[in-house]
Amino acid sequence: MKTFGVLLSFFMALSAGAQTAGPNLNSPSSSATEQKGAKRAPDRDWPKEPGDASVCLWKGDRLAAFSLTIDDNCAPNHPFWIEMGNIFGFRFTWFVITERVGTGGFWGTWDAFRKLHEMGHDIQSHTVSHLHGQYDIETEYRESKRMIEEKIPGHRVRTLAYPGGQHPVKNDAGVAAKYYIGARGTVGMVTPAVNMPYMRTGSQGGGIFTGERSKMETFFDPSHRNYRGWHICLFHLVKEDKQPTIRENLARVKEREADIWVGTFTEVVRYARQRDTAKVRTEERGSTRIVFTLTDELDDQIYDGPLTVKVRLPPSWTNGKAVQGGNPPPCAVIEHEGARYALVDAVPDRGAVTLTPE
Ligand SMILES: [Zn+2]
């Protein structure tokens, strides 16, 4: 099983090699992580001189990432997950078997998935038929994406969850990569932030930061292999007696939200892919103005989300305000060991970002 996984990652590295450069985190430790197979994620980076900038490993410079995913439609649980999302301000990812929608209570309706989408939840593909044999693999991947995009106008399907178990049709990460930027795999591992297997991530059932291999503290422990990793939780139908535990565990995540980025599966894999080819460059460093550019090597039609850039501010600045392309991107100022830093959520390839003291 282990060898199989290694071979698969090797195959993926080959097939994705053209568009996937090594991680470029612009941090002092990044060169050490560029070696294939290097385990350790870099610590938070603290740029040394005013005007120095680097791309954060995760959004908001958080230590780790978390996504909650729900497979196989599970319509009876929609009210529960909507309630959890509203209580905690989290958004979840549904991986939908498209040809089952509208065929009965368990499988949900397109109205129900449109409603989830309108609430900010993420509706993505779990293939057309769950690989039950009537379609080839390419049809399973292509048509499920097409169907969701047709039924939820304006929504883009960019990620896939491979159906697990034995099926007459086999999953194929190479074919999936033609239609998707990322895919959730079937192995119960924590997904590493560095050398991330975009097209075959981990997926962990059995709890939210409570599984034997995904205890919360391990994500903050620099000596642990989970350090700074991405916990992708997988749920099927949740019975009523298990719901209070889920609620308690989501409350624990909420308490650590400063250190855990809770994003949809699609947001997190998109961030990682952009981050891994991103370059930030300081163009101007004055006492009243800092200008930087942020670029990546990916298709801007697909990879159009923000990355968090950390910029060291001059000692005289008590605050900072950012402008990119005439708009103010989110910008927070934090302190660390007596210095101030701006965290700017800038979009790569959308023009220079100007920082000024507020
Ligand atoms: Zn499934």
Image: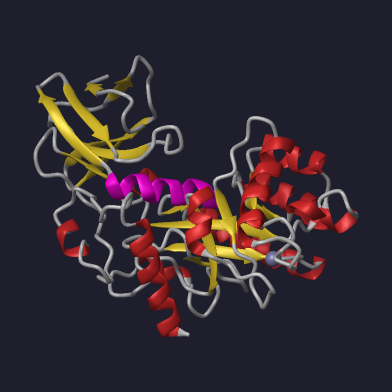
Left or right of residue 128: residue 308:
left
Q: Residue furthest top?
A: 326
Q: Residue at x 27, y 52 (%)?
A: 21
Q: Is residue 181 above or below residue 246?
A: above
Q: Please state the horizontal and vertical placement of residue 243, each as a whole percent of the image.
A: 74, 64
Q: Answer with the quarter of the image where residue 285 lies.
A: top left
Q: Residue furthest right?
A: 104
Q: Is residue 258 above or below residue 154?
A: below
The reply to whether residue 12 is in sight is: yes
225 or 117: nearer the viewer: 117
Left or right of residue 349: residue 302:
right
Q: Answer with the quarter of the image where residue 227 lies.
A: bottom left
Q: Residue at x 33, y 49 (%)?
A: 19
Q: Please state the horizontal and vertical placement of residue 283, each as a whole percent of the image.
A: 13, 26
343 or 28: nearer the viewer: 28
Q: Which residues are magenta?
A: 263-277
Q: Please state the horizontal and vertical placement of residue 12, each as a whole percent of the image.
A: 40, 64
Q: Is residue 319 above or below residue 16?
A: above
Left or right of residue 85: residue 256:
left
